[in-house]
Amino acid sequence: MMKQSNWRNEKGSKPPSFYAVTNAAKERPDVWIDQPEKSVILQITSDIRTIRTETFATPYSLRFPRIQKIRHDKPWYDCLDVQILADMVHAKSGDDGQGAEGGTQLKGRAKRVKQEKPESLPSSLVPSHMLVTDVSRVKQVTRLFDGLVFYIANTTSEHPIDKLHKLIVENGGTFSMNLNNIVTHAVASEKKGLKYQAASKNGDVIHLL
């Protein structure tokens, strides 16, 4: 959520560089938000629609979202992003494949006789970015990262966040789930997303290959 004074009219203007758009003519926004750092976090409740769409860049959307409260205790970049939303859907369905009609595939069924109503999933799951990696059994091997605190801005399937956290601890370092003053190094797999944008404004970001 952002104050109206920070909105930019969409008509006749290009989307900010960090937007992912399909340029669908019938679904253009009224305004662009080009300064997300001036936003506040909203806590909402909603169902997740698993029907796929080519109109929007996000593969899933929220159905009937309802605002519960404003989270003034959360920084603007600590929000649900597209990748985390997709992870929540896949974790709930137990499969990351999608059926021909756009709904979540159900294992153990050879085919569908008729089109089914797309499933709505409750968003009661804990987002992956809020889960802290259990490193209680990780043994320190070296002191390579001694005194260093790492913040992981984003990851890919090749570099899952829990694996990175354990690697940090194995080499004597620590990690923070939030981008705060104790963080000495920020790490990212991709140059995109709000968390990456926030980390890059604070200093250099280490990129994983």
Image (tube, rainbow, N blue to C red):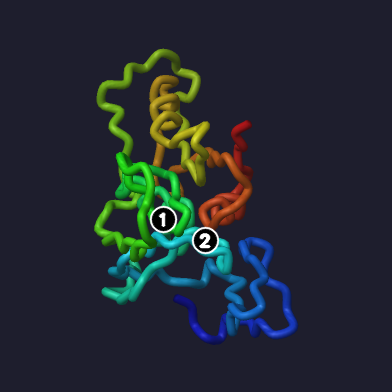
Q: Secondary structure at mark 1?
A: helix
How many C-alpha atoms fall within 10 Å of the one at disc 2: few (<14), some, or many (≥20)? some
Count residues near mark 1 (Cα–Cα under 10 Å), then give few for <14, some for 14-19, many for 20+.
many
Q: Position of residue 7 (x, y in %)?
A: 58, 82
Q: Quadrant of residue 65?
A: bottom left
Residue 48 sits above or below residue 152 on the image: below
Q: Is residue 180 visible?
A: no
In the displayed structure image, the side of residue 85 where residue 137 appears, left or right:
left
Q: What whole-number distance in Å separates the C-alpha atoms at marks 1 and 2? A: 9 Å
* Residue found 65% across the figure and 85% down from its top: 9
Q: Earlier in the sequence, mark 1 or mark 2?
A: 2
Q: Which mark is residue 58?
A: 2
Decide: marks 1, 2 in contact (CB < 8 A)? yes
Where does the image place residue 188, in percent across and percent down from the top left? 56, 41
Q: Is 74 situated left or right of 25 in this image?
A: left
Of 25 and 152, which appears nearest the observer?
25
Q: Amino acid at mark 2?
A: Thr
Q: Nearer the viewer, residue 133 or 52?
A: 52
Q: Quickly name the residue at label 1.
A: 85
